Image (cartoon, rainbow, N blue to C red):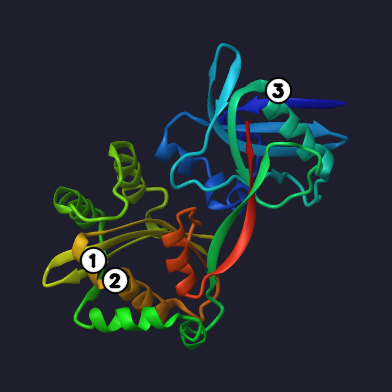
Amino acid sequence: MTETRILRPEEVIKILPESILRLQPLYNQPEFPELIKPGKLRFGQVSHKNETIFFPFTGDVFLWKWRIFQLPYCQQFSPFSTSEIQFNAESSTLWLEWLREKSYSCQWAFPQMEINPAIKGIRTKTNQFLDLKKTADEIFSSWKKGRFNSLSKSSEFETIELDHAQFKKFLENLNLTNGGRGWKPNTFEKAAILRISNSDFFGKNLKRFAVIENGMCLSLILLLEWNGRWHYLFSQSSARGFETDSLTRFFYDFLLINAGKGGVFDFEGSSLPGVHSFFQSLGAEEEHYFLFEK
């Protein structure tokens, strides 16, 4: 018998041992998507051949069909089981068929898993990461020459850790004065990143940094560590920060302290060629995940 049910997070929490839930990746934690866009997280529960798999997704219903979308700062969702079984392609295929039939539009990103290769609408995406089991010297040996040239521009800069109030103040000032090039958060993205920064649940896992020159913030960074994986959720630089490549100073200082301790630094990937190249110049490796679109 095959059955697909859509559950709210509170329903999943009642039937799923917390020990299993907290071992899941960051994006699967109900508290994380809730900080970005409250009320949009659901779990597809697919029961097939004595196997029950949960497929997290975010979306809303309009006229009996779903509009399924990706959230900012939430790269992908990982299907999981309540047991140690390795689920097969049948359950995954059933879920993708449900997405196709029950949605008006769909963007659902997921890691590599067994799927029917004949399914249409799936394309490959690229994520980038650094292996923090490597020592700082090993990582720096993979840096491109330009990264070390950038360090010479920022020899007088300081990377400091912030609390939420300081982070919020720098973010507001940066967006008042940032007339230079580079990404700038819109109102929704800014509100979401501030909710994440101020989260009580993730408080001890959050790290906020600024690269400072003479008291001025050149770059602002928010990281969230979960189960040994550092998620590079947010960064923004001023015009002066771009001019001096101040983010290179942050990565140098961060890696001096954290390289060799194990875990992974997850850059969250980027489809922008310049950003991808910058991560690559830091020695980032690549891994693939997938996006099902309709």
Q: Which residue is mark 1?
A: 241
Query: Amino acid under label 1?
Result: Gly
What is the secondary structure assignment of the residue under circle 1?
helix
Q: Which residue is mark 2?
A: 245
Vertical side of 255 occupied by 85: above or below? above
| Amino acid at the residue labelled 3 | Glu
Tell me whether the residue at label 3 lies in contact with that at label 2, contact meaning CB atoms closer than 8 angstroms: no
Check disc 3 and report the residue beneath it. Answer: 101
- How far apart marks 1 and 3 lie (CA) works out to 47 Å
Above or below residue 99? Residue 282 is: below
Q: Residue furthest front?
A: 273
Callout 1: 10 Å neighbours few (<14), some, many (20+)? many
Task: Work out whether mark 3 precedes mark 2 in sequence or the reverse, and give the earlier one.
Answer: 3
Q: Residues within 10 Å of mark 3 (few under 14, many from 20)?
A: few
Identified at 69% across, 38% down, the residue is 54
Mark 3 falls on what kind of element?
A: helix
Q: Residue 278, percent across and down?
A: 42, 67
Q: Considering only order in the chain, which callout, 3 or 1, is on the residue closer to the N terminus?
A: 3
Could you say where residue 5 lies in the image, as x and y percent from the top left? 70, 25
Q: Position of residue 158 (x, y in %)?
A: 22, 76
Label 2 near label 1: C-beta < 8 Å?
Answer: yes
Q: Are marks 1 and 3 in contact (CB under 8 Å)?
A: no
Rendering quarter of residue 164: bottom left
Q: Which mark is residue 185?
A: none
